[in-house]
Image: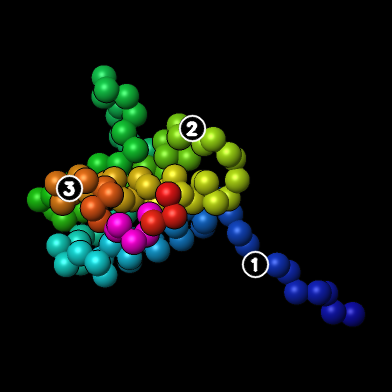
Amino acid sequence: MVRPPLPPLDTRIERFDLAVGTAAEFLRSAWPELREVRFEIADMPAASDDDGIPRWRVLSAEKRIILFRIPIERLSHLHRNDDLHRRMTIEGSVFRAAAEYLDRDPWDLGPERFRYF
């Protein structure tokens, strides 16, 4: 007897990684200044400041952007709790972090991407 094939693993962490990766690739293709920037994912920041828990950290001198998965997933207030809105929240965090790195408005980074709003 042969078992049926198992479905591929689809975890929350893998979906987060995919959302960050696709948004980062879009930004790299649109902005030459971001082509050398590394987008990294960490679970939590090392220590919280008095300003609260950061969702990302921009290290311009090192050409790194670190996105913190747990604060983005847990502290974001979704008006609809579904896969689409969770992905939009993650992508929005990537865009805001990249905008901070470039010292621009997030809406300037991909105006065609937000045409449906």
- The residue identified by callout 2 is 77
Tell me if residue 111 is in the magenta stretch. yes
Question: Residue 92 at what x, y percent from top left?
Answer: 37, 47
What's the magenta region?
110-114
Viewer-nearest of discs 2 and 1? 2
Check the image and name the residue furthest to the left. Answer: 61
Label 3 amino acid? Arg
Q: CA distance from mark 2 to mark 1?
A: 29 Å
Q: Residue at x 60, y 45 (%)?
A: 82
Question: Residue 116 at what x, y percent from top left?
Answer: 44, 55
Q: CA distance from mark 3 to mark 1?
A: 39 Å
Residue 54 image-quadrant placement: top left
- The residue identified by callout 1 is 8
Q: CA distance from mark 2 to mark 3?
A: 24 Å
Nearer the N terminus, badge 2 or badge 3? 2
Label 1 amino acid? Pro
Q: Mark 1, residues whose alpha carbon is within 10 Å: few (<14), some, or many (≥20)? A: few
Residue 58 numbered tag: none
Nearer the N terminus, badge 2 or badge 1? 1
* Left or right of residue 4: residue 110: left
Question: Is there CB contact under 8 Å for labels 2 and 3?
Answer: no
Label 2 amino acid? His
- For label 3, the SS is loop
- The residue identified by callout 3 is 104
Tell me if residue 93 is in the magenta stretch. no
Q: Main secondary structure of the magenta part?
A: loop
